[in-house]
Image: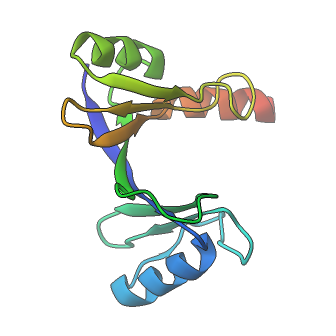
Amino acid sequence: MTLFVSHTTIDCHDAYALSEWWKALLGYVDVEGDPNLPGHEECMILDPESGHQLLFIEVPDQELPAKRIHLDLRPRTGTRDEEVERLLELGATQIADHRGKYGPGTGWVHFADPEGNQFCVLRSEAEVATQEAQVSGT
């Protein structure tokens, strides 16, 4: 099993304003079907050529953390939970477990590498597709 970078996450105070600024700078666009609007606490933008994504997430802290940018990773094969176990065996430090944050089968797990660099492990694309099919009844 291995992981791939799903997107790069940036902690901020105003997700919408910052995503709009980076869209103008980089020529990125909103994700189709998921437009960013003022007041959104999470705003994803996409490079229409490479597919790279930046996710801006509002954090409540008055002072932003020193490590404001981190990678969000998805399993290439297998499941998020299998990767969580593998990462713990490799020596990653679990910082927080947000599995189930938005209901059963959702969420992510927050880790740090051996030098303290933070990253999150999301559900695999197959897990997301399975849950979406269950929700839509197909």
In the shown orientation, is residue 72 left or right of residue 123? left
- Residue visible at 64% across and 30% down in the picture: 106
Number of numbered callouts drawn: 0
The residue closer to the viewer here, 100 or 110, is 110
Front residue of 93/104: it is: 93
Q: Quadrant of the N terminus?
A: top left
Q: Height in image: 56 above or below 26? A: above
The reply, left or right, for residue 40 in relation to residue 31 is: right
Is residue 86 left or right of 114 when viewed as pictured?
Answer: right
Q: Is residue 112 visible?
A: yes
Res 138 visible: no
Identify the image quadrant of residue 91: top left
Q: Is residue 49 above or below residue 24?
A: above
Residue sitting farthest toward the bottom: 24
Residue 126: x, y in percent? 49, 28
Residue at horizontal 29 percent and vertical 66 percent from the top = 50
**In the current view of this chain or complex, which residue is farthest to the front?**
63
Identify which residue is drawn at 58% across, 70% down. Answer: 13
Asked whether 26 or 49 is in front, the reply is: 26
Task: Indicate the position of residue 69 as horizontal and vertical percent values.
Answer: 36, 57
Q: How is the image coloured?
A: rainbow
Quarter in which the C terminus is drawn? top right
The x, y position of residue 79, in whole percent, is 44, 19
> Between residues 84 and 113, which one lies in front from this camera angle?
113
The image shows residue 96 at horizontal and vertical percentages of 51, 28
The part of the image, by quadrant, that contains residue 89 is: top left
User: What residue is at 69 percent from the left and 32 percent from the top?
Assistant: 101
Where residue 61 sits, quadrant-wise, is: bottom right
